């Protein structure tokens, strides 16, 4: 898929965010000068956009450090400086290569996330992308608590043309994972994508279960999981951040997948999540199709967010 077409879809997907707060920020400086009052108004706009307290403070500090040079329209200059500051903050999540560096075989990716965030769909889309890149992929249905999750993964496996390892609903998730890793090794699989349960209301149980799954993976495949991706739904804003904290306490996370960015006015949450957690955003989703999930590129994202 051409880069340009994803950029257009990203821009389209971020329309709500652009209309609600990016345009407001431009308007702040149209009618007043650069002073504490206008900076306060800007701070408020960023907070309402779910950018988060820590990230907002950092952005405002960056703007405060340097007075406008007066060479151009104040609104445009402040928007440009805000963009530069945001890109700088997000660059901690350097653009992922098109797909992960698959230096080990099988390359194991563990997926975390509460129910309803688009975790199984994300696994299915990545499976399809890896498959079309010529890789041999295996899905592991580790969310055994919901029969629907296993069925959904099955449908994605068929659609992507990949195999899936599953047990009957209610089985021990780590047993499914054990079988999955064994199957991957014997079948010469390149990439294993593991789904897990996401019932956050039983935090202790969830944490113990994830630890057990990790132990099984590490025992069967040293250095694995090679990636642990937490899937978050952008439409939940700050709640997503709370979920992320719980998962981060439970297990090491190497990256975040932010889905449903096309359905929210709070696209700024991506800045807050990364700043608060110190975990890079690896992929973003802006729609239903397989191509709507792409590696995250900070400057492309910020450009799409601000460009009229």
Image: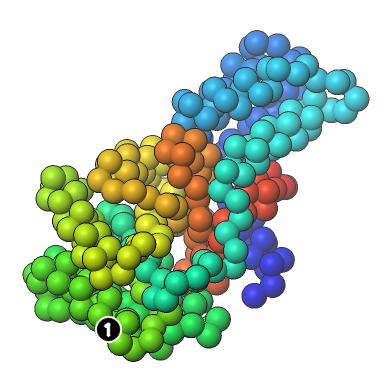
**120 sits left or right of 175 in the view:** right
Residue 78 screen position, x and y as percent: 74, 28
**102 sits left or right of 306 in the view:** left
Name the image quarter holding residue 111: bottom left
* One can see residue 47 in this view: no
Mark 1 crowdedness (10 Å alpha carbons): few <14, some 14-19, many ≥20: some
Front residue (pair 9, 245)? 245
Q: Is residue 205 above or below residue 274?
A: below
Count of numbered circles in the view:
1
- Which residue is denoted by mark 1 in the rendering? 183
Q: Residue at (60%, 51%) from the top-left corner? A: 94
Q: Please identify the quadrant where the N terminus is shown.
A: bottom right
Q: Residue at (56%, 48%) from the top-left corner? A: 93
Q: Residue furthest top?
A: 36
Residue 193 screen position, x and y as percent: 36, 71
Q: Residue furthest right?
A: 71
Residue 307 screen position, x and y as percent: 72, 47
**78 sits left or right of 279 in the view:** right
Front residue (pair 241, 70)? 241
**256 sits left or right of 294 in the view:** left
């Amino acid at each position: 898929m051409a880069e340009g077409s994803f950029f257009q879809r990203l821009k389209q997907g971020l329309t709500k965010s652009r209309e609600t707060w990016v345009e407001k920020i431009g308007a702040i400086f149209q009618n007043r000068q650069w002073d504490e009052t206008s900076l306060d108004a800007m701070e408020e706009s960023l907070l309402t956009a779910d950018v988060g307290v820590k990230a907002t403070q950092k952005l405002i500090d960056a703007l405060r450090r340097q007075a406008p040079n007066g060479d151009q329209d104040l609104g445009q200059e402040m928007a440009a400086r805000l963009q530069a500051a945001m890109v700088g903050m997000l660059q901690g999540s350097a653009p992922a290569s098109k797909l992960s560096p698959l230096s080990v075989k099988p390359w194991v990716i563990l997926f975390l996330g509460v129910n309803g965030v688009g975790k199984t769909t994300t696994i299915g889309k990545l499976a399809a992308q890896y498959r079309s890149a010529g890789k041999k992929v295996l899905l592991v249905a580790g969310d055994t608590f919901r029969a629907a999750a296993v069925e959904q993964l099955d449908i994605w496996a068929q659609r992507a043309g990949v195999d899936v390892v599953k047990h009957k609903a209610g089985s021990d998730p780590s047993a499914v994972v054990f079988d999955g890793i064994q199957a991957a090794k014997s079948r010469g699989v390149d990439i294993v994508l593991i789904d897990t349960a996401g019932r956050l209301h039983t935090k202790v149980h969830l944490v113990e279960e994830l630890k057990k799954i990790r132990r099984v993976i590490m025992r069967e495949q040293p250095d694995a999981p090679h990636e642990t991706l937490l899937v978050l739904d952008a439409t939940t804003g700050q709640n997503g951040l709370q979920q992320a904290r719980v998962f981060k306490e439970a297990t090491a996370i190497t990256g975040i997948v932010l889905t449903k960015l096309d359905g929210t006015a709070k696209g700024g949450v991506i800045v807050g999540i990364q700043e608060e957690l110190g975990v890079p955003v690896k992929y973003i989703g802006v729609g239903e199709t397989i191509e709507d999930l792409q590696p995250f590129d900070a400057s492309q994202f910020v450009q799409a967010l601000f460009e009229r």
